[in-house]
Image (cartoon, rainbow, N blue to C red):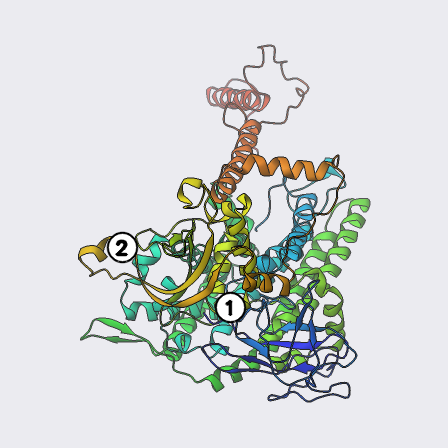
């Protein structure tokens, strides 16, 4: 996938846009910033070269200071943007502030302000009553933002942004219990906070489907993207090889299904009919499960499934757990209500099928016995449709949120007790205000899919977004925007030598290298180095400054760096002594075919050498020293910290304990340990007899006192006594015994 998503460089002082040009294989100009910024409050968008403002002097030999977050990189005229999402992105003559103000990045297709902001690969239902506490999400959400900022290019993925936003919503979904002795599994305002999770899921899926078409990628428009995706994704699974062998007509049909699930089905997230929301839930789960089977995308798919649980209700979860309750008849005639609901549901399914057939030209070829498909609309028609529906979708979201807020207000008013009613209303006011604020701020990144709609938003919403943008509370998304590797997946292969004559390849644990090695299963772990090697192969090595430092550490024989390459030292060819020389070669890899015989039948990959990626270097080499000095990657003295500090000692101890284990093993151990603890906790609360414990009540007046050692509980004993008394009275009335007859209880 080409990573040249629309990214503009904007002066941090005057917000004047600069033109961003992609020199990648697609060779297209990304255009100027049409995104409303602080310097463009009216939100007017004008395609083409940017207009130079009063403070702009063009290039003029100046040097722009790029400032993504806390990192500043100096950039001279015409130089590529170091560490940018697209290796071919460079600044063309545009806006540079003569006052020396830094230039910040504004991402139009992904997360704002990050190097990998628009990278196409970046990245529940009601919780248990005993686990819903805002302390856990609060501890997860904000501390995770620290490595996100410190890790820079290694942590700038969309799923990292998604995790930060989901962690923030977790604080609202699981509020802190101030009164533990009066806590309930479901609060009156929980529908409002869970709606924010549903809105996040909608923004994620809808934008991911839309950007595939707005990118004008020929593979997505030709429905051939999946014929390349399985072998060109970063770390495929063994199932990806088999999926790659499927016929082309099925791959095209799969792309159509992807469009339907990501663009059309998310509209059902806010449907008033329960079964439509359940249908949307299972569609999203199906898509994520298929992605899990064919690709290693760490925690992203599991997190998306958790977000999809916001589409469920208590009744459906109880059905899963075997605790479904018997339905009671409502005020409406059940038959009429069920008939209208079923009718609307069938109409929605029919409309969805008709929309799919009409817009993707679905037609059965009886001679070939295949289902043909093609895109039956143009780019202009799609952008017009997108411009038409973007603001109405905002209106639908506002109406849906308003309904949840009013419903929560009604539930709060219905609470018994004056104090508890006021307490519920206070919570409702706080969380409803927070929900409205989060929804309003999220409209700015959501409307990035259509710049005209973004410009029509109230300027106050833009000011709110600019105020909270640095906290990563809301983000924009757009996965798998463009498909790279159409002519073969590029792959960097490292080689080491002692004499410059005999070269030995350095195999990584996860990324493709050995053509006979099967693709691994590493999810939910993400080997960040292997991922960055995939990105580095898409461009020149100068676009990845960290690569020179990586080679330098391998030449030094740093154990911590070697462990990122191979955990087992026996598999690292230079474990005894570091290599004297290192170079990197660029190859192109393809999956082998299912019809290959002989030696190719035992291989998973076939490859072809393209060119040299990194020159031969050694310690003290002028080329390597120049690259390290240029990017400030030379050895520095470690910061001095007190040796008695508890937190560094704790982290270092945990790190030493996890050294012998791989990333997937550590994560699965943590997950299984947490699941086992939850299971043991549930079993400990369960009574031995298997039935829920009955609340003990004292004997009623006239009832005999139980002195049998507690062999029967009070409810069972009283039930048997009532049955015996009823049978005795019935017999007495029938035989004529006793002056009074029996009375039936209603």
Instruction: Name the residue located 64 percent from the left edge and 38 percent from the top edge.
Output: 652
Can you say whether 744 is above or below 343 in the image? above
Could you tell me residue 467's position as x and y percent? 76, 67
Circle nearer the N terminus (1, 2): 1
Query: How far apart are the alpha carbons under marks 1 and 2?
Result: 34 Å
Q: Are marks 1 and 2 in contact (CB under 8 Å)?
A: no
Report x, y in % for residue 574.
Answer: 44, 46
Assign the N terminus to one quadrant of the image.
bottom left
Depth check, mark 1 against mark 2: the one in front is 2
Find disc 2 in the rendering and name its residue: 603
**For residue 480, above or below residue 176:** below
Residue 483: x and y in percent read 43, 71
Could you tell me residue 367's position as x and y percent? 18, 75
Identify the mark at residue 208; answer none if there is no mark. 1
The reply, left or right, for residue 234 in relation to residue 398 is left
Name which residue lies at 68% across and 46% down. 139
Using the image as rendered, state which of residue 534 and residue 326 is in the foreground: 534
Q: How many marks?
A: 2
Q: Nearer the viewer, residue 729 or 589?
A: 589
Q: Secondary structure at mark 2?
A: loop
Q: Identify which residue is drawn at 57% across, 31% down.
A: 681
Which quadrant holds the C terminus?
A: top right
Q: Residue at 49% x, 86% y: name it.
A: 380
Tell me if I can see residue 157 in this picture. no
Residue 219 or 382: which is nearer the viewer?
219
SS for dot 1? helix
Residue 216 seen in render: yes
């Amino acid at each position: 996938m080409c990573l040249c998503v629309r990214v503009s460089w904007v002066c941090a002082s005057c917000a004047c846009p600069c033109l961003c040009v992609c020199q990648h294989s697609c060779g297209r100009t990304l255009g100027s910033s049409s995104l409303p910024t602080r310097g463009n409050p009216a939100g007017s968008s004008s395609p083409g070269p940017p207009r130079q403002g009063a403070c702009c002097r063009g290039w003029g030999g100046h040097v722009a200071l790029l400032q993504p977050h806390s990192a500043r990189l100096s950039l001279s005229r015409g130089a590529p943007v170091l560490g940018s999402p697209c290796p071919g992105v460079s600044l063309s003559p545009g806006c540079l502030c003569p006052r020396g103000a830094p230039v910040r990045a504004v991402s139009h297709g992904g997360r704002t302000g990050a190097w990998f902001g628009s990278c196409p690969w970046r990245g529940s239902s009601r919780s248990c009553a005993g686990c819903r506490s805002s302390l856990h999400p609060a501890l997860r959400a904000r501390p995770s933002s620290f490595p996100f900022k410190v890790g820079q290019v290694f942590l700038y993925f969309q799923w990292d942004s998604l995790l930060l936003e989901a962690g923030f919503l977790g604080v609202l979904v699981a509020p802190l219990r101030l009164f533990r002795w009066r806590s309930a599994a479901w609060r009156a305002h929980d529908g409002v906070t869970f709606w924010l999770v549903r809105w996040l899921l909608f923004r994620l899926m809808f934008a991911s489907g839309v950007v595939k078409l707005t990118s004008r990628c020929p593979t997505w428009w030709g429905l051939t993207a999946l014929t390349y995706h399985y072998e060109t994704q970063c770390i495929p699974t063994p199932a990806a090889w088999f999926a790659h062998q499927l016929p082309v007509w099925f791959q095209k049909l799969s792309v159509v299904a992807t469009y339907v699930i990501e663009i059309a089905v998310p509209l059902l997230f806010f449907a008033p009919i329960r079964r439509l929301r359940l249908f949307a839930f299972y569609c999203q789960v199906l898509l994520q499960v298929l992605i899990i089977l064919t690709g290693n995308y760490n925690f992203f798919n599991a997190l998306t499934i958790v977000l999809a649980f916001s589409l469920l209700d208590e009744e459906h979860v109880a059905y899963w757990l075997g605790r479904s309750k018997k339905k009671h008849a409502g005020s409406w005639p059940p038959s009429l209500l069920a008939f209208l609901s079923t009718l609307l549901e069938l109409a929605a399914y029919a409309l969805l099928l008709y929309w799919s057939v009409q817009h993707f030209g679905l037609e059965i070829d009886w001679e070939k016995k295949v289902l043909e498909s093609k895109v039956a609309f143009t780019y202009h028609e799609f952008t017009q449709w997108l411009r038409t529906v973007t603001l109405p979708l905002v209106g639908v979201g506002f109406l849906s949120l308003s309904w949840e807020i009013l419903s929560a207000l009604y539930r709060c008013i219905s609470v018994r007790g004056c104090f508890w009613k006021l307490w519920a209303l206070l919570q409702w006011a706080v969380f409803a205000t927070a929900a409205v604020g989060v929804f309003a701020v999220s409209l700015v990144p959501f409307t990035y899919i259509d710049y005209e709609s973004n410009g029509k938003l109230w300027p106050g919403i833009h000011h709110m977004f600019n105020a909270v943008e640095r906290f990563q509370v809301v983000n924009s998304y757009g996965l798998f925007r463009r498909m790279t590797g159409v002519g073969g997946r590029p792959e960097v292969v490292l080689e080491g030598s002692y004499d410059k004559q005999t070269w030995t390849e350095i195999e990584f644990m996860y990324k493709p290298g050995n053509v006979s090695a099967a693709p691994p299963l590493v999810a939910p772990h993400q080997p960040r180095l292997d991922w960055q090697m995939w990105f580095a192969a898409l461009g020149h090595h100068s676009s990845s400054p960290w690569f020179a430092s990586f080679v330098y550490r391998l030449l030094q024989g740093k154990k911590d760096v070697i462990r990122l390459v191979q955990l087992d030292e026996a598999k690292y060819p230079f474990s005894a002594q570091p290599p004297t020389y290192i170079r990197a070669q660029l190859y192109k890899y393809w999956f082998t075919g299912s019809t290959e015989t002989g030696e190719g039948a035992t291989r998973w990959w076939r490859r072809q050498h393209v060119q040299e990626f990194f020159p031969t270097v050694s310690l003290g080499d002028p080329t390597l020293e120049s690259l390290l000095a240029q990017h400030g990657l030379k050895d520095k003295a470690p910061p001095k910290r007190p040796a008695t500090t508890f937190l560094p000692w704790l982290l270092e101890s945990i790190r030493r304990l996890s050294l012998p284990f791989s990333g997937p093993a550590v994560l699965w151990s943590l997950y299984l340990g947490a699941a086992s603890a939850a299971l043991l906790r549930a079993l400990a609360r369960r009574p031995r007899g298997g039935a829920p414990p009955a609340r003990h009540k004292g004997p009623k007046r006239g009832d005999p006192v139980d002195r049998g050692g507690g062999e029967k509980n009070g409810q069972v004993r009283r039930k048997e006594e009532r049955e015996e008394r009823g049978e005795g009275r019935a017999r007495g009335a029938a035989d004529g015994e006793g002056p009074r007859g029996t009375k039936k209880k209603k």
